[in-house]
Image: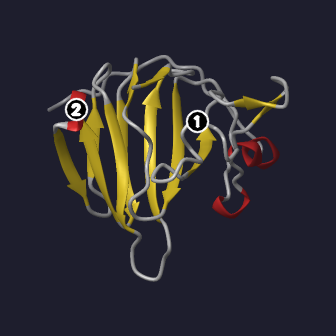
Amino acid sequence: MSQLKQYEMEIKELSPEQMKHRVARHSELKYPPDRYPDSLLPGNERKNYLVVGTGLIVDGGKEPMSAIPISEGFQMSYVEAKPGNGPKLHNHDTNETFVAIKGQWRIIWGLGEKYSVDLNPLDVCSVPPFVPRRFINLTPGEGRDEGLLLTVQPGNVAKVEFM
């Protein structure tokens, strides 16, 4: 017979009013077109929506561009892009995990973009820290112009270096 170990954790109560600040509606998400230096270049055009985290501050450092601006050890973003588009090769000091939501996506890694794997909807690829990576949308998904990719990074602010 197994025994359940009991942990002493602080239990919190949140009211519906408090919890509404931790809900993001996709239809209300915002993104800055120039979030990354390559975001507007042909072949790199994409929309990066920071959904959870505080890694993106706009308006002179006053307003987080996140739907849920919390610092709880991770960031989550959506990326929308038309086929053939995605960021240039870049590097992070953190892991970056990708989940294809709509359409097919190619995750590319290594100097010289030597390796790749294609993701179908709900497939996941996790790239370790300090491994150069990029991604491109291959197909948008049925009835769509843009594919949808979910990205998750540990830490409150990931450093990025474009190659």
The kind of residue on which mark 1 rests is Tyr
Q: Secondary structure at mark 1?
A: loop
Q: Can residue 74 be seen here?
A: yes
The residue lying at 41 percent from left, 38 percent from top is 88
Q: Residue furthest bottom?
A: 143
Q: Is residue 163 above or below residue 107?
A: above
Residue 126: x %, y % from top left: 28, 37
**Mark 2 → mark 1, Cα distance in angstroms:** 21 Å
Q: Can residue 110 be seen here?
A: no
Residue 22 got which mark? Answer: none
Scheme of colours in the image: secondary structure
Q: Is residue 42 above or below residue 95?
A: below
The residue lying at 54 percent from left, 47 percent from top is 41
**Which residue has dot 1 on it?**
36
Q: How many marks?
A: 2
Q: Is residue 51 above or below residue 157?
A: below
**Which residue has dot 2 on it?**
112
